[in-house]
């Protein structure tokens, strides 16, 4: 089957069925034997999601009326993406995209005309797209409004960074190998990388690479994790003998990092409501040779799972809008809805309320999200402090991030990092 047709089918599942791009791609790529074909399909799907609002605007200018067939619309977007953003020769992009209509032969003439008209009117259509803010930034209107409201001075940077491919960062397992030694291993394999100064365990590759091509993956020498996410373990400051709770732990990157940083914990309990995602926690811990108590349960109902033994450290990596990691998951722009934010805020608040009583006096709770919205971050943290007199902020003193009334915000792209928020609380 044509790679362009496969890409269009993947995009249809995202646009029509609300499937995540990761899920839709996984099943499609498994059917392709060629690494080159898999890479091409992935590039098309990520690219169309990344620039969907620009491509969709241009497509609307080329059509007399909207396309009702999602498969054909997705294929038209695939064609436009090749012409605008890829180095595919125009004649090849058009002919191969037209051929990809398959049995829907009625669409051949339509796709051919749309793509050829774009080439004829390219300058005019691109200029028109630049005058439309949603098309120019490739973000939906509601998201433009939300981010601009939270960060008027940083909004242009966030929009631009969201449309870039994120760097590939590694978390070196310091319990097995030093960062300098692992960097040397990469050099021996002619893989260029640099140390991320804001995080003790982080290395950023100059170019993304398949994990199986990197030294020591099976041996647990490293994991793939953004530098911003790696800051959690350092902020938690786990001491030997501590009992630690990792709330909403899947897929387990931060769980493992805590154990790598402090192997002598009394116990680490990882809880998540999603059984499928919890299997990834098990897989990650097994590869890294780490051990944790894993519980599949609703963290907002401790009465169902807690053994009444307090924790000295709690990490709450709260469910959020994930607007800080759009560059890694561009389908968030298509799948997230404005009314999701209020529901997520309510869940974040419920989690904070439920797990605070599980923290021992003198203990530390770190609240984290991969969002850039103030209502999920500093406003949530401030509301928590206002309603919990036994909680005080443990300020974060660091060179990274923007200091807020409570906690610190990492703006997407700062020091190459994802958008992240951290706040730290002590129990009096």
Image: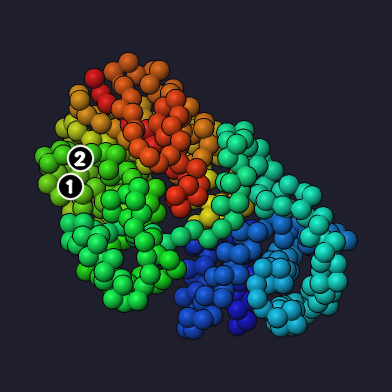
What percent of the width, then of the height, locates residue 190? 35, 76
In the displayed structure image, the side of residue 263 where residue 283 appears, left or right: right
* Residue assigned mark 2: 238
Can I make out residue 299 in this image? Answer: no
What percent of the width, then of the height, locates residue 193? 37, 65
Q: Gap between marks 2 and 1, in whole Å?
A: 6 Å
Q: Secondary structure at mark 2?
A: loop
Q: 405 or 147: which is nearer to us?
A: 405
Q: Quadrant of the C terminus?
A: top left
In the displayed structure image, the side of residue 71 where residue 119 appears, left or right: right
Residue found at x 24% / y 62% = 180
Can I make out residue 144 in this image? Answer: yes
Q: 166 or 66: which is nearer to us?
A: 166
Few, some or many C-alpha atoms within 10 Å of disc 1 (few <14, some 14-19, many ≥20)? some
166 versus 111 height, above or below: above
What percent of the width, then of the height, locates residue 304? 27, 36
The numbered mark at residue 329 is none
What percent of the width, then of the height, locates residue 275? 34, 53
Residue found at x 34% / y 51% = 197
Q: 126 or 191: which is nearer to us?
A: 191
Q: Quadrant of the N terminus?
A: bottom right
30 versus 131 height, above or below: below
Looking at marks 2 and 1 on the same chain, the residue that comes earlier in the sequence is marked by 2
Residue found at x 49% / y 62% = 23
216 versus 343 height, above or below: below
Residue found at x 39% / y 54% = 226
- Taking the view exactly as shown, the residue that stands out farthest to the top is 389
* Residue assigned mark 1: 262
Which corner quadrant of the image does residue 394 belong to? top left
Which corner quadrant of the image does residue 384 belong to? top left
Say whether marks 2 and 1 touch (CB < 8 Å): yes
323 versus 290 height, above or below: above
């Amino acid at each position: 089957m044509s790679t362009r047709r496969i890409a269009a089918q993947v995009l249809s599942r995202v646009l029509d069925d609300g499937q995540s791009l990761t899920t839709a791609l996984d099943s499609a790529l498994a059917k392709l034997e060629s690494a080159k074909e898999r890479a091409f399909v992935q590039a098309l799907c990520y690219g169309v999601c990344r620039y969907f609002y620009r491509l969709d605007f241009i497509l609307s200018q080329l059509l007399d009326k909207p396309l009702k067939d999602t498969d054909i619309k997705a294929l038209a977007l695939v064609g436009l993406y090749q012409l605008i953003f890829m180095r595919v020769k125009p004649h090849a992009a058009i002919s191969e995209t037209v051929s990809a209509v398959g049995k829907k032969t009625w669409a051949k003439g339509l796709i051919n005309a749309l793509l050829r008209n774009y080439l004829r009117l390219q300058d005019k259509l691109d200029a028109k797209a630049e005058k439309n803010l949603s098309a120019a930034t490739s973000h939906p209107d509601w998201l433009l409004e939300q981010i601009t409201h939270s960060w008027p001075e940083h909004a242009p940077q966030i929009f631009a960074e969201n449309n870039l491919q994120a760097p590939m960062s590694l978390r070196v397992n310091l319990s097995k190998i030093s960062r300098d030694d692992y960097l040397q291993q990469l050099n021996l394999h002619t893989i260029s990388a640099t140390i991320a100064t804001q995080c003790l365990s982080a290395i950023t590759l100059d170019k993304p690479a398949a994990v199986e091509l990197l030294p020591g993956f099976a041996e647990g020498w490293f994991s793939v994790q953004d530098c911003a996410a790696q800051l959690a373990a350092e902020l938690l400051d786990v001491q030997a003998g501590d009992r630690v709770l990792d709330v909403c732990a899947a897929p387990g990157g931060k769980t493992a990092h805590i154990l790598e940083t402090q192997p002598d914990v009394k116990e680490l309990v990882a809880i998540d409501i999603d059984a499928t995602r919890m299997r990834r926690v098990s897989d990650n811990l097994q590869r890294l040779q780490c051990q944790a108590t894993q519980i599949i349960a609703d963290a907002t109902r401790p009465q169902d799972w807690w053994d009444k033994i307090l924790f000295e450290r709690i990490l709450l990596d709260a469910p959020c809008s994930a607007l800080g990691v759009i560059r890694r998951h561009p389908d968030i722009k298509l799948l997230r809805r404005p009314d999701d934010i209020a529901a997520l805020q309510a869940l974040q608040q419920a989690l904070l309320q439920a797990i605070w009583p599980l923290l021992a006096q003198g203990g530390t709770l770190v609240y984290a999200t991969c969002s850039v919205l103030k209502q999920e971050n500093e406003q949530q943290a401030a509301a928590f402090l206002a309603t919990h007199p036994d909680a005080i902020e443990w300020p974060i003193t660091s060179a990274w991030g923007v200091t807020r009334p409570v906690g610190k915000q990492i703006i997407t792209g700062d020091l190459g990092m994802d958008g992240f928020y951290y706040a730290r609380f002590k129990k009096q």
